Image (cartoon, rainbow, N blue to C red):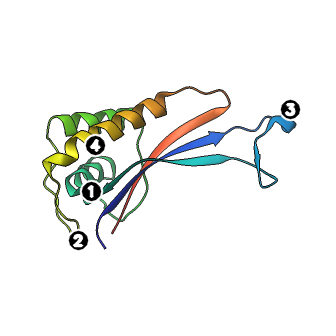
Amino acid sequence: MGLDMYLEGRKYIWTNWEHPEKNIKEDGFKLKVTILELGYWRKHPNLQGYIVKVFADGKDECQEIELDTIALANILDAVKRDELPETSGFFFGESVPEDKKPTITIIKNALKWLETKEEGVSRSVFYRASW
């Protein structure tokens, strides 16, 4: 039990109407979306608090929160500047200085992934916490 935090990347695969035989299939069905785990944190409540406060109007209901490139850049900046708010919760644990470097790497990689252009694909990033 505790705070688990997930950063997912979703690749939405467009339908090729002109050449339907080129559509990617899995198990005999057209593939519409793939979901990638871009990041995972275990008990980093200050990051959770920042994301909920800034991008979910303070509403913390373990909901999915979509993060665009501007949001990811803002998170990255807040982490680098040590501007994450002290946050606590039931079984949330405690953010520690060792969380900073891997968090920067995860957010940078997610931002790069989101900005990658690929023909026939659109991308989105979502954050979700669970406790």
| Mark 2 residue element | loop
Q: Label 2 vs label 4: CA separation?
A: 20 Å
* Percent x, y of residue 8: 46, 48
Q: Which mark is residue 91?
A: 2
Count the labels in the image. Answer: 4
Q: Position of residue 100 (x, y in %)?
A: 20, 43
| Dot 3: element | loop
- Tell me what residue is drawn at x 41 percent, y 37 percent: 110
Location of the N terminus by quadrant is bottom left
Labels 3, 2: front one: 2
Q: What is the three-letter code of the residue carrying label 2?
A: Phe
Which of the two discs, 4 and 1, sits closer to the camera? 4
Residues 104 and 115: in front is 104
Please give the residue where the numbered disc 1 appears in the rendered image: 58
User: Tag on residue 19?
Assistant: 3
Crowd rating for badge 3 (residues with CA inside 10 Å; few <14, some 14–19, many 20+):
few
Q: Along the polypeptide, which appears first: circle 1 or circle 3?
A: 3
N-term-proximal mark, 4 vs 1: 1
- The correct choice, above or below, for 78 with respect to 87 in the image is above
Distance in Å between CA atoms under marks 3 and 2: 52 Å
Please report whichever mark, 3 or 2, sits nearer to the chain's N-terminal start: 3
Horizontal placement of 62 versus 33: left or right? left
Q: Disc 4 to disc 3, how far (Cα)?
A: 42 Å
Q: Is residue 64 left or right of residue 77?
A: right
Tag 3: residue type? His
